[in-house]
Image (cartoon, rainbow, N blue to C red):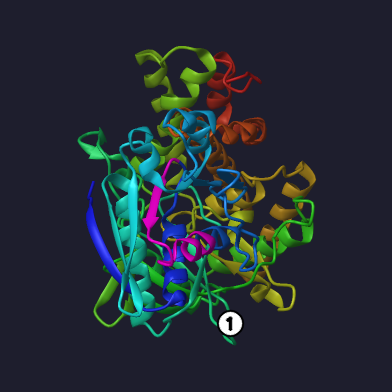
């Protein structure tokens, strides 16, 4: 990981406040920023801007911690603002709960020289100096925090060079990937979004000398998003307009399609909205899709195939992560061979089924409800860069068995009915073949998700994903009711894979 020193000139207080935004957008749990500088160099302005940016509130009260020694803020991540001027010894820092603070959040520390030996190795130093009528900031450090700060500065430079100098940056909801998003605000202008999508790190080989992301055809750079966005827009799907792009660095400025939740105010599914989304899928699947997309002169994206290797590497996440978690033992060779044989037989059945573009995560977090519009424009679609050409039924299963919300059987049924009706209205539609493909894809997707959610818990420390497991197990049970999946149902039952167990 990179490290080093970066310096910037801050001509006025506004520039110092923008620096606070840039630092805030780079901050993650476990980071420690050591802030030092003489009186009047802007430490207070910088700290206040950083905290207000994370709070998404330009008027958020940020009192000085001079007398309390620490002020904590319930932002994301939580920020603990320390002023150590009155600290008598390094040992007192532990009494202030510093270790606990950086285990669940980040720390901004003024007067860090009072406890030099108490900070972690990934400390980032921020030093402010008077320079003429302005100030100079010197930032130094090593490891991931400094790399994130450098990238945040690159985003600021991108904005400045793209006509968005002075745009206010605040965090926006992200996903489980390395991508992140920001809101961009300028007085008198519509709010925009910035996508920060660094090139994918492929990781170590996991099978036949190939990394997981290569086998699963995960998008390796932002060009995939741009290409799929272009193709969907041409097909009449409402997707964000790309205002400005830097494909090399992985930065996009996007239209904000709105904030309308696809779910209701209580986070529950609305049958009419799921039916509308199913009708949109029917419109997409009734069209012909080419794998090669020219989204700008001499700029191309090739949509990969959702081939057998990709289907299998995904479902094998159940073997690698979920099965050891629920059974207490690693899957043996006999189980692996039976598992592979059954799934390969199911994948054989998919070869004769309808193929189309597969958006991959077509469910509530990635659908924006726009009631002020009509017909398909009521639905804004995001997060589709991993699209492939594969079984059309996959996205229907992704929608009707939404991984993030409990979908009652009744809403699943009305969603499927809306899809079938729209497909019949559009032309010839093999309903029986669809039903079989839907069940296979629902079983494949939800088996994969069981593995992913356990991996997020055990590898990444994200225990909150375990709360979704009962729902996903229920979805697998529904899928296994189709006669074509009887062998898989028997395998899962013999090994107790769908029993409710504590992990």
Residue under the image location 35 percent in, 15 percent down: 333
Crowding near pointer 1: few (<14 within 10 Å), some, many (20+)?
A: few
Number of callouts in the render? 1
Residue under the image location 25 percent in, 61 percent down: 6
Task: Say if residue 177 shows up in the picture.
Answer: yes
Give how far across and how far down residue 374 sits, in percent.
Answer: 72, 78
Give how far across and how far down residue 237 sits, in percent.
Answer: 55, 73
Residue 500 in the image: above or below residue 300: above
Horizontal arrangement in the rendering, residue 345 relative to residue 294 (left or right): right
From the viewer's side, name the closer residue of 171 and 453: 171
Q: Which residues are magenta?
A: 30-49
Residue 334 in the image: above or below residue 258: above
Q: Does the magenta portion include 45?
A: yes
Horizontal arrangement in the rendering, residue 14 relative to residue 294 (left or right): right
From the viewer's side, name the closer residue of 305 and 446: 446
Residue named by callout 1: 190
Badge 1 element? loop
Give how far across and how far down residue 254 sits, in percent.
Answer: 48, 74
From the viewer's side, name the closer residue of 123 and 494: 123
In the picture, residue 236 is in which quadrant? Answer: bottom right
């Amino acid at each position: 990981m990179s490290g080093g020193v970066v310096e910037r000139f801050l001509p006025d207080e506004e520039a110092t406040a923008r620096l606070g935004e840039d630092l805030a957008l780079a901050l993650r749990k476990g980071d420690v920023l050591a802030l030092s500088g003489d009186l009047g160099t802007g430490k207070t302005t910088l700290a206040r801007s950083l905290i207000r940016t994370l709070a998404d509130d330009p008027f958020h009260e940020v009192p000085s911690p001079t007398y309390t020694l620490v002020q904590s803020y319930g932002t994301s991540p939580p920020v603990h603002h320390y002023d150590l001027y009155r600290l008598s010894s390094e040992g007192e820092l532990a009494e202030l709960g510093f270790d606990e603070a950086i285990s669940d959040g980040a720390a901004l520390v003024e007067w860090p020289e009072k406890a030099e030996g108490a900070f972690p190795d990934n400390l980032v130093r921020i030093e402010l100096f008077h320079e003429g009528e302005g100030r100079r900031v010197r930032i130094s450090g090593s490891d991931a925090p400094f790399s994130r700060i450098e990238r945040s500065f690159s985003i600021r430079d991108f904005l400045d060079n793209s006509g968005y100098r002075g745009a206010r940056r605040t965090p926006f909801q992200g996903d489980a990937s390395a991508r992140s998003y920001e809101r961009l605000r300028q007085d008198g202008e519509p709010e925009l979004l910035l996508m920060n999508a660094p090139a994918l790190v492929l990781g170590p080989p996991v099978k036949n000398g190939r990394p997981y992301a290569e086998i699963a055809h995960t998008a390796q750079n932002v060009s995939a998003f741009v290409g799929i966005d272009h193709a969907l827009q041409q097909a009449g799907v409402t997707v964000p307009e790309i205002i400005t792009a830097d494909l090399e660095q992985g930065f996009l400025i996007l239209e904000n399609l709105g904030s309308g939740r696809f779910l209701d105010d209580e986070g529950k599914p609305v049958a009419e909205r799921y039916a509308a989304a199913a009708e949109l899928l029917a419109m997409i699947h009734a069209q012909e899709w080419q794998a090669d997309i020219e989204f700008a002169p001499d700029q191309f994206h090739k949509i990969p195939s959702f081939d057998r290797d990709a289907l299998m590497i995904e479902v094998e996440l159940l073997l690698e992560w979920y099965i050891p978690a629920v059974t207490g033992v690693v899957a043996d060779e006999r189980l692996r061979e039976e598992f592979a044989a059954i799934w390969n037989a199911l994948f054989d059945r998919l070869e004769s089924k309808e193929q189309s573009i597969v958006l991959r995560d077509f469910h509530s977090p990635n659908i924006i409800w726009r009631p002020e519009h009509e017909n398909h424009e009521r639905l804004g679609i995001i997060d589709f860069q991993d699209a492939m050409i594969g079984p059309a039924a996959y996205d229907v299963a992704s929608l009707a068995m939404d991984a993030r919300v409990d979908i009652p059987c009744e809403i699943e049924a009305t969603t499927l009915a809306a899809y079938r009706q729209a497909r019949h209205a559009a032309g010839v539609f093999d309903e029986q073949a669809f039903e079989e493909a839907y069940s296979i894809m629902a079983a494949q997707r939800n088996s994969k998700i069981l593995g992913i959610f356990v991996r997020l818990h055990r590898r990444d420390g994200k225990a909150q994903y375990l709360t979704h497991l009962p729902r996903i197990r229920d979805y697998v049970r529904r899928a296994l009711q189709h006669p074509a999946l009887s062998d898989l149902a028997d395998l899962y039952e013999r090994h107790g894979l769908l029993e409710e167990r504590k992990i």
